[in-house]
Image (cartoon, rainbow, N blue to C red):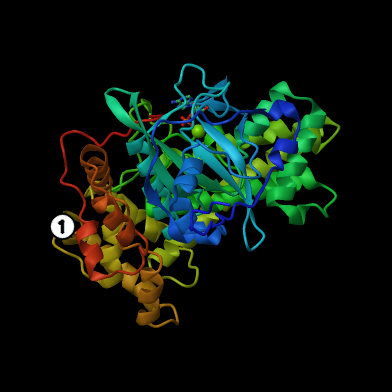
């Protein structure tokens, strides 16, 4: 018998398909459409290892074929998920139009995570789209999702990006690419909206039970698992949105199909980080009315959660008036919960360990000064952390001098030493965020010149945002104020 002499390395795929065992109306079985000549652009070694996947095997021809959708890994049952969603407030039937769930990887720690290919070709939900994705946006998702992870914010992860060797038509021809996304699940508010509109109450119960089991298994023992499901989803969103606000992250398309029930940030389209503090900041080119502006994100999250609660009404109580009351009571708690997490986080950003009635007004007056003087959000907190107020308009103002005295007096009223406060601030105020001009420079070098070194260096400095290391200083400079506001584009 002929042998190649090469040892065959097992990749380590350990896939289960619990979603594929749900009612058939929830999805469509669909294989990826093969691509011409896949090339691995970036692989997330540490994520691969934590999934129990062999990095070397993933880099082999066979490994890359899987990441490109040219080969189906053992145990996979590829499918496109059906979902609906309110897009900018309008309800639409959607579904995975350019993504496929390969299966759920059971990790060495026994966790279950979705493995999804994004950009893997047309599906029955593609509508007029080509089912493909361009290299720039897929690398953008890779960079921002990994940066969010490093910031300590729940997020889907990026395992790899491969180019397809095919070009796709956008405004200009673009290299095609596929991202392998890893998520706690792809259950969305929109998944429930889909089943609530087009399925039976039994289907809805199956979906709710599945969601509880997958993400909130502690709820099973309770006598009101569906109310508990609503409460838990609300709790996780309150934490998540507070974290977004605290680092200045703007999602850009908070449609109900882009809100994951796991509490992870999902679907990095036209997202970006705010430089100068301004609650009206919008980056997305299609967000004409500022629906998803920075300052509006908590309100929109509440709105999306209300849409989620509506889908659960048939399960909450046989008496629909009672069900509505239960749902409204829970939804009304979101604002307060969100505010609690935001305030807790803001206190940490200012080095405060305990609570004082005046804290909120102290924080609000700092933010309104930052707004007035166009101060950079991240760098203002960093300067306060290290007491290195430079000669910008904010720090030179008398208003700030007065505020600073109040803040110092407040710090003096707590028992902890200044050094402990500074430590708290260092771990609550990132040295850097993925600045838009840095991300664009990395994507430009990658897409236009095939030079991935800029992106890799950026990923490296972003991987430990609380290190406050000297090499991060360079990356913390905000862009020069430009006549043209920064714009991001969706669904490309
Ligand atoms: P998004 O705005 O990325 O959340 O996408 C909204 C919907 O459009 C989802 O159902 C996507 O699957 C679908 N979609 C986005 N881009 C494409 C594409 N190029 N081809 C097919 N469907 C797409
Ligand atoms: Mg989406």
Give the percent coordinates (x, y) of residue 14: 64, 52
Would residue 271 appear left or right of 191 to someone viewing this image? left
Relative placement, left or right, of 74 versus 18 is left
Q: Quadrant of the C terminus?
A: top left
Please give left or right for residue 461 compared with residue 77 in the image. Answer: left
Q: Which residue is mark 1?
A: 392
Asked which secondary structure carries label 1, the reply is: loop
- For this orientation, the residue located farthest to the top is 128
Q: Give the image quarter of residue 64.
A: top left
Query: Percent from the top left, x then y, of residue 107?
Result: 62, 58
Using a 10 Å C-alpha cutoff, classify the residue at mark 1 as few (fewer than 14 neighbours), some (14 to 19) or many (20 or more).
Answer: few
Decide: is 370 above or below 447: below
Ligand 1 closer than 8 Å to label 1 CB: no
The part of the image, by quadrant, that contains residue 349 is: bottom left
Q: Position of residue 170 (x, y in %)?
A: 32, 23
Q: Nearer the viewer, residue 421 or 60?
A: 60
Give the answer, above or below, for where 243 lies relative to 309: below
């Amino acid at each position: 018998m002929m042998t190649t002499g090469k040892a065959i390395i097992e990749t380590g795929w350990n896939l289960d398909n619990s979603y594929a065992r749900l009612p058939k109306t929830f999805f469509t079985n669909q294989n990826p459409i093969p691509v011409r000549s896949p090339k691995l652009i970036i692989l997330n070694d540490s994520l691969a290892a934590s999934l129990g996947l062999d990095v070397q095997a993933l880099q082999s021809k066979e490994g890359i074929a899987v990441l490109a959708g040219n080969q189906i890994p053992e145990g996979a049952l590829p499918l496109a998920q059906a979902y609906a969603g309110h897009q900018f407030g309008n309800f639409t039937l959607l579904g995975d139009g350019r993504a496929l769930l390969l299966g759920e990887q059971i990790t060495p720690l026994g966790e279950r995570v979705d493995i999804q290919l994004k950009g893997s070709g047309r599906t029955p939900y593609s509508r007029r789209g080509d089912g493909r994705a361009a290299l720039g946006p897929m690398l953008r998702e890779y960079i921002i999702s990994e940066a969010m992870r490093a910031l300590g914010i729940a997020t889907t992860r990026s395992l790899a990006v491969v180019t397809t060797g095919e070009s796709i038509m956008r405004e200009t021809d673009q290299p095609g690419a596929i991202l392998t996304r890893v998520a706690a699940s792809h259950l969305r508010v929109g998944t429930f909206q889909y089943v609530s509109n087009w399925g039976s109450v039994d289907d809805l119960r199956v979906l709710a039970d599945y969601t509880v089991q997958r993400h909130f298994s502690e709820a099973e023992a309770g006598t009101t698992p569906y109310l508990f499901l609503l409460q838990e989803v609300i709790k996780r969103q309150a934490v998540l949105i507070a974290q977004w606000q605290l680092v200045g992250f703007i999602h850009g398309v908070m449609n109900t199909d882009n809100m994951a029930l796991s509490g992870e940030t999902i679907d990095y389209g036209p997202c970006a980080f705010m430089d100068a503090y301004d609650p009206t900041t919008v980056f997305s080119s299609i967000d004409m009315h500022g629906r998803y502006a920075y300052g509006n994100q908590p309100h929109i999250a509440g709105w999306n959660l209300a849409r989620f609660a509506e889908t659960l009404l048939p399960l909450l109580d046989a008496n629909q008036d009672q069900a509505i009351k239960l749902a409204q009571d829970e939804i009304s708690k979101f604002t307060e919960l969100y505010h609690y997490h935001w305030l807790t986080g803001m206190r940490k950003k200012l080095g405060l360990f305990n609570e004082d009635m005046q804290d909120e007004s102290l924080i609000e007056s700092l933010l309104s000064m930052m707004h007035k003087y166009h101060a950079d959000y991240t760098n203002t907190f960093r300067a306060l952390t290290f007491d290195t107020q430079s000669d910008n308009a904010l720090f030179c103002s008398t208003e700030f001098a007065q505020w600073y005295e109040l803040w110092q007096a407040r710090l003096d009223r707590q028992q902890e030493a200044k050094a402990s406060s500074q430590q708290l601030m260092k771990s609550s105020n990132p040295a850097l965020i993925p600045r838009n001009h840095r991300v664009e420079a990395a994507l430009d070098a990658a897409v236009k010149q095939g030079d991935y070194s800029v992106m890799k260096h950026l990923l490296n400095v972003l991987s430990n945002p609380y290190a406050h290391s000297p090499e991060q200083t360079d990356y913390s400079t905000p862009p020069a104020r430009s006549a043209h506001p920064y714009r991001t584009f969706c669904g490309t």
